[in-house]
Amino acid sequence: MTTIGKKVDTINQHIDKVMENASTKLKVSVNVNDADWQKIQELFAKERQWMTSQMQIHIREVNSMFADERKKVRERYKEYDGCYLGHYAQWFFWFFFTIGFFVVAGGVGMIIAQNYI
């Protein structure tokens, strides 16, 4: 019984040693005929083309989402920040500023005209 146990232990140690070195020493070579290699290359080319088309579709979707979001943000900016309101307020200010300027200038001109004529 001990003889068989020692042999099993020796075999297990040998297997463990082989498995330790297997990742560095194990080399596999495969021979593929030209027809099969061509099929493999065609499959890889089809897969790559499919992946590329899927990525392009995804990129187009993302770009359209960004464009839609930019439009929404632009509309929100116009609504809440008062971009157009600021534009109209500027015209409102300049309209009354010029009227006020000419009224004041006319009043000063009338005062000067009354005192010196």
Image (cartoon, rainbow, N blue to C red):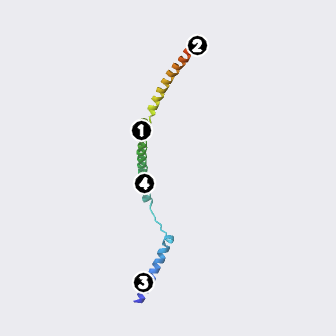
Figure disc tally: 4
Q: Residue 36 falls in which quadrant of the image?
A: bottom left
Q: What residue type is labelled 3?
A: Val
Note whether 14 is above or below 109 in the view shown.
below
Looking at the image, the residue that sits furthest to the left is 1
Q: How far apart are marks 1 and 3 (CA)?
A: 79 Å
Q: Which of marks 4 and 3 is nearer the N terminus?
A: 3
Mark 2 lies on a secondary structure that is: helix
Choose mark 2 or mark 4, whichever is in front: 2
The residue carrying mark 2 is 115
Give the x, y percent position of residue 73: 43, 40
What kind of element bears circle 1?
helix
Residue 74 coordinates in the image, percent (x, y): 43, 37
Distance from Cα at disc 2 to Cα at disc 1 = 57 Å
Secondary element under disc 4, as helix, strand or loop, is helix
Q: Which residue is tagged 1?
A: 76
> Residue 17, image x and y in percent?
48, 77
Numbered disc in front, either 4 or 3: 3
Tag 3 residue: 8
Residue 42 tag number: 4
User: Farthest residue toward the right?
Assistant: 116
Q: Name the amino acid, label 4.
A: Glu
- Tell me, for residue 55, which label it has, or none: none
- At 48% across and 29% down in the image, what residue appears? 90
- Marks 1 and 3 in Cβ contact (< 8 Å): no
Q: Earlier in the sequence, mark 1 or mark 4?
A: 4
Circle 1 or circle 4, nearest the eye? 1
